Image: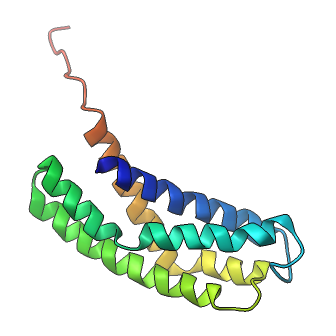
């Protein structure tokens, strides 16, 4: 289950990186260019990864018996709120007949998306530590 969370985080981060590159191109529309054809695909994958993210995390905490569970649950409430807010912004962009670089630049600047990305960076680090147990420190020298 931790692998699912890891995959979702990577998908969302990859979308954001692609959006940064897309925004820098100065395209008036998503029609007629290779990256224009890809932007909707990246956004759709991100929507799928964000949908149910907090619930997936909660399930993983139970399955992995991570403690203290209440601390994880409190964070997942924040994650859920940030994911839902980001979803609303992305779905608004996807509903547009054309997606310009400027529109994506504005999406990149959205405080909602930035909050979610920060949540994911934190979550990725937590998942990494759960996947790779810390090595014991030998204090004997």
Q: Is residue 98 above or below residue 141?
A: below
Q: Looking at the image, which residue sits at the far top?
A: 141
* Horizontal and vertical percent position of residue 72: 19, 61
Instruction: Please identify the quarter of the rendering in which residue 31 is found.
Output: bottom right
Residue shown at 50%/54% (left/top)?
Answer: 10
Seen as rendered, the residue at the extreme right is 32
Residue 96 falls left or right of residue 122? right
The residue depicted at 16 percent of the width and 15 percent of the height is 139
Lateral position of residue 48 relative to residue 37, left or right: left
Q: Is residue 97 above or below residue 70?
A: below
Q: Is residue 9 left or right of residue 34?
A: left
Quadrant placement of the C terminus: top left
- The image position of residue 129, as x and y in percent, is 29, 40
Displayed quadrant of residue 27: bottom right
Q: Residue at the spot x=58%, y=73% of the render?
A: 44
In the rendered image, residue 125, in percent from the top left (x then y), is placed at: 36, 47
Q: How many marks?
A: 0
Decide which of 30, 121 is in the foreground and name it.
30
Give the residue drawn at x 80%, y 78%.
Answer: 30
Camera-side residue of 56 and 12: 56
Placement of 118 over or under 112, stated as above or below = above
How is the rendered protein coloured? rainbow
């Amino acid at each position: 289950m931790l692998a699912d969370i890891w995959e979702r985080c990577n998908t969302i981060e990859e979308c954001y990186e692609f959006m940064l590159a897309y925004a820098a191109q100065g395209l008036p529309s998503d029609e007629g260019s290779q990256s224009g054809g890809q932007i909707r695909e990246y956004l759709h994958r991100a929507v799928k990864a964000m949908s149910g993210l907090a619930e997936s995390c909660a399930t993983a905490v139970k399955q992995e018996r991570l403690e203290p569970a209440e601390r994880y649950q409190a964070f997942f409430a924040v994650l859920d709120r940030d994911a839902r807010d980001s979803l609303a912004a992305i779905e608004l962009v996807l509903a547009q007949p054309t997606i310009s670089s400027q529109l994506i630049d504005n999406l990149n600047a959205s405080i909602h998306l930035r909050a979610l990305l920060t949540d994911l960076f934190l979550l990725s680090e937590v998942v990494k530590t759960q996947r790779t147990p810390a090595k014991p420190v030998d204090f004997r020298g």
